Amino acid sequence: MSNKYSVIVLMGIQGSGKGTQGQLLADDFGFTFLEAGGMFRDEVKSGSKLGQQLDEIIHVRGELVPDEITKELISSKIKEIDPNSTVILDGYPRTKKQLHDLDEILNKADRDKIVVVNVKITDKETLERLSKRKICEKCKSVYRDEGQENCSKCNSKLTRRADDTPEKIKTRLAWSHKETDPVIEEYRERGILVEVNGSPSIKEVYQEVKKKLDLQVT
Ligand code: AMP
């Protein structure tokens, strides 16, 4: 299909399911999925010096990674992607500073057809969902089902994320309202924001996402 968008930015608080929606879009339309949190976790796993620093920031202090490190990593990842492939960004930008950094990154990469999808759920739903969330160690698929032990896709073990404790979830929510809500507002003012209700089933949310983005599987 032709490239209707060069970048799809996914917004939505923790547990909104935006990552799942991004993965579905990537699978169905061949888009390139770039998730900030996953990118950092991969760096931690690599055991590099930067990875050890990130481990402390993310898992011990429960904070966001400094803007310059984030900008550098996102920028280098985007440069590696085929210019003709639509990039789906999940978890970036989260602050107004990052929004302006992203403008710069995308300008340099000549990516100007941008749409922003805000997947909306309440804080209460976030806490409920994340308290149950499990993630596949290998392929990073996300599961909401408490009973499931292994990944349906690759059969690897499902684990809980170290930062999915109620206290750390609340810290992230507070960050999100203070820092990320203004990002959403700026995209709204630019006229490139579409909003979907993240409360229904994954399938229903996905139908709404495709409809609002005017995307059809051919
Ligand atoms: P997530 O998987 O989106 O929950 O992200 C996991 C962790 O990675 C967060 O708690 C942050 O410490 C870090 N992180 C993710 N996205 C960003 C970002 N845009 N800027 C800074 N740190 C981030």
Image (tube, rainbow, N blue to C red):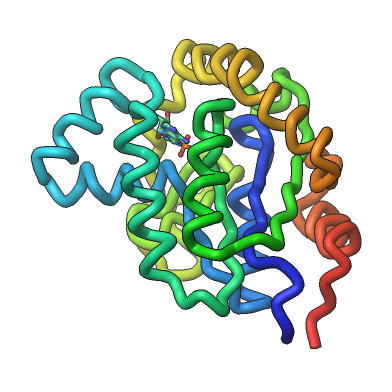
Q: Quadrant of residue 130?
A: top right
Place of residue 158 in the rendered image (x, y in percent of width and height, measured from the top left): 40, 50
Q: Is residue 44 left or right of residue 15?
A: left
Task: In the rendered view, tell whether residue 87 sits above or below residue 2.
Answer: above
Place of residue 29 in the rendered image (x, y in percent of width and height, measured from the top left): 67, 77
Task: In the rendered view, tell whether residue 103 sits above or below residue 167.
Answer: below
Q: Is residue 180 left or right of residue 45?
A: right
Residue sitting at x 48%, y 58%: 108
Residue sitting at x 16%, y 51%: 46
Q: Is residue 204 left or right of residue 69?
A: right
Q: Residue 1 versus residue 37: which sits nearer the camera? A: 1
Q: Quadrant of ligand 1?
A: top left
Q: How many marks?
A: 0
Q: Quadrant of the C terminus?
A: bottom right
Task: In the rendered view, tell whether residue 61 sits above or below residue 68.
Answer: above
Residue sitting at x 60%, y 78%: 30
Q: Quadrant of residue 52?
A: top left
Q: Quadrant of residue 124?
A: top right
Q: Residue 185 versus residue 198: which sits nearer the camera? A: 185
Place of residue 186 in the rendered image (x, y in percent of width and height, measured from the top left): 74, 31
Residue sitting at x 73%, y 86%: 1
Place of residue 34 in the rendered image (x, y in percent of width and height, measured from the top left): 48, 57
